[in-house]
Amino acid sequence: MRISVAFNLRMDSSEETAELLTQEDVERISTALRELRHQVTPVEVTGQPDEVVGRLLDSAPDLIFNCAEGTIGSSREAFYPGLYEQLRIPFTGGNPSLLHMNLDKKLAKTVVAARGVRVPRGVLVTPQNRKVPADLKFPHIIKPNAERSSKGITQDSVVESRQACDRRLEELLKRYPAGLVVEEFIAGRELSIPIVEALPGKIVEIVEHTFDLDEIGGAYNIYDYDMKQGGDRSRGVGVVCPALLAGTEARLGRSYTAQEQAGGNLAGHRARTRNPRRTPRTRAEQCHHRREGRSRRSLHPEGRLCGGSRHQRVDHSSDRGFSDRTGRRRHFSAQSCSRRICAQRGW
């Protein structure tokens, strides 16, 4: 199969470009696909739309392996699958409406809550409307509404007083004028459930991230930007796979997964996902959990999907396929690519 890997190249190490692929990422993914006997062409899709269309058409793909994150605006991810649909080229990952929803935390919470998924109480704050309800319980967590990769998240993102909340809002609204989500912080365990549609049962192994607060130097177990980027505090982050779940937690995990799969179907979700959540520690806290949906799994060797696949020993030679956005069956497996990448890193 002729596969074009669509991506935006990361040119620097700034926080603004954190979601983009480095050249090493591109080469790793392309190599994994080639080892599966596909003809692979990396296509950089940053730039003017007419130029992007020309590069894609010149690569003459049977399938686009979509890793493009976009660089401009709150619909930056949704632009690319919309373009592929108009070009009538099959692609991996979510459709435009899904990717738009996933980059809007407030909208995503509204959609999944309508499907019965419990979410933390919160409010969207903008430069024009900075009102935070007085009955929103402290501590609060404050995060950019239209960002991912923990951009804008530090150990100072959890605030315990009105004064601290106002100071944090003033600081972050200058950097993220599209808006901030202010939510009740839910203490608990950080669990990720990688979901791959082609896999029987759809669930790869559940992964837990643990936090050594003494090493991190913080009061709350939040997975902040510095940790995800391999900074000093990442030494305090541990990975447990499979996560050790008690009976109640296991039932909650299965229930949340079923609910979120239904929510994904509501949004036209046929893609692979990974769903980090915060499982409440006590029965009283079981009224809420943290939900973050993603339309594509991370293919980084240290990512959740690769970790779960490694433990589950997903066979890269499997002929499991997936349905692309045209509905045709494709004998290319996301697990296969992940397994190859893990093997390249000696996992």
Image: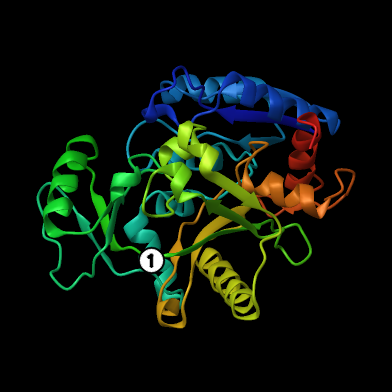
Q: Residue furthest front?
A: 214
Q: Is residue 78 left or right of residue 143?
A: right
Image coordinates for residue 320, horizontal then vertical, percent: 83, 53
Residue pictured at 79% horizontal, 29% vertical: 344
10 w.r.t. 310: above or below = above
Residue 210 in view in this figure: yes
47 w.r.t. 337: above or below = above
Image coordinates for residue 160, horizontal then vertical, percent: 22, 59
Disc 1 marks which amino acid?
Ile
**Tag 1 residue:** 186
Residue pictured at 66% horizontal, 61% vertical: 243
Q: Is residue 114 left or right of residue 142?
A: right
Q: Which quadrant would the C terminus be assigned to in this image? A: top right
197 w.r.t. 261: above or below = above
Image coordinates for residue 203, horizontal then vertical, percent: 70, 62
Q: Nearer the viewer, residue 215 or 139?
A: 215
Q: Is residue 167 left or right of residue 118?
A: left
Within-10-Å neighbours for mark 1: few <14, some 14–19, many 20+: many
Q: Which quadrant would the N terminus be assigned to in this image? A: top right
Residue pictured at 49% horizontal, 33% vertical: 229
Residue 86 in view in this figure: no
Q: Quadrant of residue 118?
A: bottom left
Q: Nearer the viewer, residue 74 or 85?
A: 74
| Disc 1, SS | loop
Numbered circles on residues, count: 1
Q: Nearer the viewer, residue 288 or 260?
A: 288
Image coordinates for residue 314, horizontal then vertical, percent: 83, 50
